C-alpha cells in the first residue's frame, strides 16, 4: 500500500527506481524516517526564506547579514527536505519581525508558501544579535512554529555559525525530528600543503583547515563519535600505524604501535572500539578490533587483503569490510565477533563501504562492469542490506570513491575526479543537490562527523 | 850523509828508551782480553718487490762483521747486489755468519702471472653494498590487480636470493600499485605483492627475519601518466637494503 503511493509520486525514471527500492525498505522498517524523508515528494514543506532585515546601520551589520542570509538559504536548501520557494515569487515587503508579517501575501500564489522563516540581524558593541522566526503561514490562528534569538561576537564565522544553528532548529522541527547537520564537520585528505595531511571543513565546504602536520603521508581520517579525536593511518619511518589526533589538545596523542602495517581505522558509534586492518598476524592485511585506546587488539577476519572495516552504527553488532579473498575486491559483512561472514557484492570491483546511520543501507564504490578495457568507471551505489537491492547514486563519469554518510543519513559526501583531479563532492541520498566542496589541491577520503 | 846517520841514531835511541820503559811494566798483571767479536748484522731488500712473470727484480744486501755470507746457500760478497727473475713468488734468504754468530735476512719478490695477450680487463671497481644491491635485486612487476609472481619475477627473485644470502643482507620489500584502484584497497594489495616476493625469497633459502615488508599502495608512484606503460611501472615490488 505504502509502496503504491510512493510510485504514484515518482517524477522520473531514476526517482521511480529509487522510490520502488525505498518503498521496499518500508515494508521492513516502516518507521524509518530516512525513507520517509527521501520520499517526501510533493509532501515536502514549501518553504520561503526571505533575507533577514538589517536591524540597524552599524557598518558591520550589512556584511554579516549578507553572510548570514547566504548560509541560512544554503543550509535549508541543502537539507533536501524543503520545496524552496524561488525568491522571484516573494512579495516586495519582507518582514523583519512578526508585527510586519502579512501572512496572506506569502501563503497565496504566487509564493504559495506553507512555511516562512524571517527575522533581523544587527551588530551592537561588537556583538551580533539575530532574531529569527518560523511561521506556518496557512495557520493564522497559531502561526508561530519557532522563535529564536542569538547573540555572539560580531564575526563572519559567528554569523555563519548562527545561521547553521537556526537552520538546524528549522530542519529538526520540519524534518520529522531528525537533527540538522549544519554544524557537522567533514574530515578529508588534502595534498595542498605539499603532502597528504588530514584537513577539516564545515559540511558546506567553508572553513577548510589543516589538522595534521605529519610530514609524510596521512590517510583515512575517521572522527570519533564525540568529535574529540581523529583516528587516521600515518606512514612512519618503517610502517603504517594507526594514529590519534586530539582536537581538544590540538596535537597527536599516544596510540599503541603494532608490528607490521596498520591502516583504515573505523570507530564503533559508541566510541568504545576501533576496527582496522593490520598485517601483524600473517603479513597480509586482516581486520582487527581493539579498545578505543588501542589495547587488546584481536583478529576478526582471515583474509587475503582485508581492509576498510566499518561498524553498523545502529547496533555496532556487525562490520562491513572489503576483501580480495576471491580475486577482485568485494564487500563483505560479518558479526562483530568475526562470525557469520556474508559476501554482499557478486561482481566487479567493490570497495569503500559506508554504513548508513540507521543501519539499513551500505554506500560503496563499485566498478560494476569491471573487465578488460572498461577500467576506471567507479560510481557510488547504495545497497539495502536486507534485500540486497542496489541503486546507483552517481552517473557523471570519473572515479567516484569513499562515500561517507551525513549524521542525518540524508547526504553522502564522496571523492570524485570527474573534473580531472580528485575533489570532494556531496549529494543527497536521492542523487540530487550535487555540490563540489573543494577546489584547491587534490582532496580525497572524506569522513563526515557523527553529529 | 852525516846528517842522516845522526838522525838514525836518535831514532834508535828513542826506540831503546821505549823498550826499556816498556820492560819496566812487565811486572803488571796479564794484558786485558781482546774485545768480544762485534755483532753480525745483515739486511736484504728487493726492488721492486712485486713483478710480473718474466720481469726481474734486484736484490741488494749488506752485512757487518760477517765472515761468511750466503744468499740462498750460495756464497756471496758481504755486500752486493744480484738480479733475479723468479717465475713465482719467492722469498730470498741471506745468511751472514761471523764470530758473534749468524744473522738472517729475507726479502720477498711477489710474482703475478703474465698478462694474457687479450686486453687487460678493467680493474674491478670498488662497489658499495648499496650499488651491488641495486644491481642484483631489481624491481619486479605485476599484472593488474594481481599479486602472484610472473615467471620472470620468480627467476629474478631466485637470482637475487643467492646474493642476499651470500651477503647476509636484510631487505625491505615494498609493494606498490598503479593509481586506478582505491586508496585503502591498494594498501592491502601492495601487502600481498610484497608478501609474494617475501615467500619466494624464503623458498630460495632466505630467513624470514632478514625480510621486512611494507605496502605503499598507490602513494609512491614512479610516474603519473594515465597509460599502461606508466601503470605497469607502478605495479611493482621495490627492494631496499636495510642497514
Image: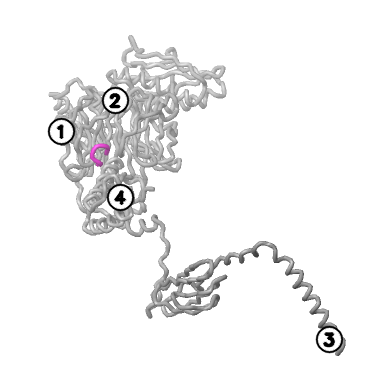
* Residue at mark 1: chain: A
Q: Do labels 2 and 1 share a chain?
A: yes
Which residue was labeled with disc 1?
A341
Which x, y percent locates residue A213? 44, 36
Judge depth for marks 4 and 3 and give the one in front.
Answer: 3
- Crowd rating for badge 4 (residues with CA inside 10 Å; few <14, some 14–19, many 20+): many
Task: Return the disc, 4 or 3, that comes first in the chain's sequence.
Answer: 3
- Quadrant containing the N terminus of chain B is bottom right
- Name the element at disc 4: loop
Which residue was labeled with disc 3?
B5
Q: Which residue lies furthest to the top in this view?
A: A141
Taking A265 as reference, is A11 left or right? left
**Marks 1 and 3, how far apart at CA:** 145 Å
- Indicate yes or no whether the magenta region holds residue A254: no
Question: Which residue sits at x=43%, y=37%?
Answer: A214
* Residue at mark 3: chain: B
Judge depth for marks 1 and 3 and give the one in front.
Answer: 3
- Name the element at disc 1: loop
Which x, y percent locates residue A18? 20, 33
Closer to the camera, B12 or B42? B12
Inspect this view and state whether residue B109 appears.
Answer: no
Which residue was labeled with disc 4?
B178
Rendered image quadrant of residue A247: top left
Closer to the camera, B9 or B116? B9
- Crowd rating for badge 3 (residues with CA inside 10 Å; few <14, some 14–19, many 20+): few
Span colored in magenta: A279-283
Closer to the camera, A275 or A72? A275
Judge depth for marks 2 and 4 and give the one in front.
Answer: 2
Judge depth for marks 2 and 3 and give the one in front.
Answer: 3
* Residue at mark 2: chain: A
Q: In this view, does B163 lie above or below A72?
A: below
Amino acid at each position: 500500500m505504502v509502496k503504491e503511493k510512493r510510485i504514484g509520486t515518482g517524477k522520473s525514471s531514476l526517482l521511480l527506481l529509487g522510490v520502488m527500492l525505498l518503498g521496499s525498505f518500508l515494508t521492513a522498517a516502516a518507521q524509518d524516517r530516512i525513507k520517509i524523508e527521501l520520499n517526501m515528494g510533493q509532501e515536502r514543506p514549501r518553504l520561503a526564506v526571505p533575507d533577514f532585515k538589517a536591524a540597524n546601520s552599524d557598518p558591520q551589520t550589512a556584511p554579516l547579514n549578507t553572510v548570514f542570509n547566504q548560509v541560512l538559504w544554503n543550509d535549508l536548501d541543502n537539507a533536501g527536505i524543503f520545496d524552496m520557494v524561488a525568491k522571484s515569487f516573494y512579495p516586495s515587503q519582507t518582514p523583519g519581525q512578526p508585527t510586519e508579517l502579512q501572512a496572506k501575501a506569502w501563503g497565496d500564489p504566487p509564493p504559495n508558501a506553507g512555511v516562512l522563516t524571517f527575522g533581523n540581524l544587527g551588530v551592537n558593541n561588537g556583538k551580533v544579535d539575530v532574531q529569527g522566526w518560523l511561521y506556518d503561514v496557512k495557520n493564522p490562528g497559531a502561526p508561530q512554529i519557532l522563535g529564536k534569538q542569538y547573540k555572539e561576537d560580531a564575526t563572519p564565522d559567528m554569523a555563519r555559525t548562527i545561521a547553521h544553528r537556526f537552520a538546524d532548529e528549522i530542519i529538526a522541527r520540519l524534518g520529522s525530528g531528525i537533527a540538522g547537520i549544519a554544524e557537522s564537520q567533514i574530515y578529508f585528505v588534502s595534498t595542498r600543503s605539499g603532502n597528504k595531511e588530514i584537513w577539516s571543513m564545515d559540511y558546506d565546504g567553508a572553513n577548510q583547515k589543516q589538522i595534521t602536520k605529519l610530514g609524510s603521508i596521512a590517510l583515512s581520517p575517521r572522527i570519533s563519535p564525540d568529535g574529540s579525536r581523529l583516528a587516521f593511518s600515518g606512514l612512519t619511518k618503517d610502517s603504517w600505524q594507526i594514529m590519534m589526533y586530539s582536537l581538544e589538545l590540538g596535537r597527536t596523542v599516544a596510540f599503541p604501535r603494532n608490528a607490521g602495517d596498520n591502516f583504515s581505522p573505523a570507530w564503533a558509534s559508541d566510541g568504545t572500539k576501533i576496527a582496522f586492518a593490520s598485517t601483524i598476524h600473517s603479513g597480509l592485511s586482516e581486520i582487527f578490533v581493539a579498545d578505543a585506546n588501542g589495547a587488546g587488539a584481536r583478529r576478526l577476519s582471515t583474509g587475503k587483503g582485508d581492509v576498510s572495516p566499518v561498524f553498523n552504527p545502529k547496533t555496532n553488532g556487525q562490520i562491513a569490510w572489503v576483501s580480495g579473498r576471491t580475486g577482485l575486491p568485494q564487500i563483505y559483512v560479518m558479526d562483530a565477533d568475526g562470525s557469520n561472514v556474508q559476501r554482499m557484492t557478486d561482481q566487479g570491483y567493490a570497495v569503500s563501504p559506508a554504513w548508513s546511520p540507521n543501519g539499513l543501507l551500505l554506500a560503496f564504490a563499485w566498478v560494476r562492469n569491471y573487465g578488460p578495457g572498461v577500467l576506471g568507471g567507479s560510481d557510488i551505489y547504495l545497497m539495502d542490506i536486507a534485500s540486497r537491492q542496489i541503486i546507483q547514486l552517481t552517473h557523471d563519469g570519473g572515479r567516484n570513491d569513499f562515500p561517507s554518510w551525513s549524521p542525518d543519513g540524508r547526504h553522502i559526501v564522496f571523492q570524485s575526479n570527474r573534473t580531472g583531479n580528485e575533489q570532494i563532492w556531496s549529494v543527497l541520498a536521492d542523487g540530487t543537490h550535487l555540490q563540489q566542496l573543494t577546489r584547491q589541491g587534490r582532496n580525497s577520503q572524506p569522513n563526515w562527523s557523527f553529529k | 850523509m852525516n846528517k842522516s846517520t845522526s838522525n838514525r841514531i836518535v831514532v834508535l835511541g828513542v826506540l831503546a828508551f821505549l823498550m826499556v820503559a816498556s820492560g819496566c811494566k812487565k811486572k803488571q798483571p796479564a794484558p786485558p782480553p781482546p774485545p768480544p767479536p762485534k755483532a753480525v748484522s745483515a739486511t736484504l731488500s728487493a726492488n721492486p718487490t712485486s713483478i710480473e712473470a718474466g720481469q726481474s727484480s734486484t736484490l741488494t744486501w749488506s752485512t757487518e762483521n760477517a765472515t761468511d755470507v750466503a744468499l740462498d746457500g750460495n756464497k756471496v760478497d758481504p755486500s752486493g747486489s744480484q738480479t733475479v727473475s723468479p717465475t713465482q713468488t719467492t722469498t730470498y734468504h741471506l745468511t751472514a755468519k761471523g764470530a758473534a754468530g749468524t744473522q738472517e735476512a729475507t726479502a720477498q719478490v711477489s710474482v703475478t702471472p703474465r698478462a694474457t695477450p687479450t686486453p687487460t680487463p678493467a680493474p674491478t671497481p670498488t662497489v658499495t653494498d648499496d650499488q651491488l644491491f641495486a644491481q642484483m635485486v631489481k624491481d619486479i612487476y605485476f599484472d593488474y590487480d594481481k599479486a602472484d609472481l610472473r615467471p620472470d619475477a620468480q627467476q629474478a627473485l631466485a637470482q637475487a636470493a643467492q646474493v642476499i644470502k651470500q651477503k647476509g643482507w636484510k631487505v625491505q620489500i615494498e609493494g606498490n600499485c598503479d593509481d586506478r584502484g582505491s586508496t585503502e584497497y591498494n594498501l592491502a594489495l601492495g601487502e600481498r605483492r610484497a608478501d609474494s616476493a617475501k615467500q619466494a625469497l624464503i623458498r630460495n633459502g632466505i630467513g624470514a627475519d632478514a625480510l621486512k615488508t611494507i605496502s605503499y599502495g598507490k602513494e609512491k608512484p614512479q610516474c603519473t601518466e594515465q597509460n599502461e606503460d606508466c601503470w605497469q611501472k607502478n605495479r611493482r615490488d621495490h627492494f631496499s637494503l636495510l642497514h
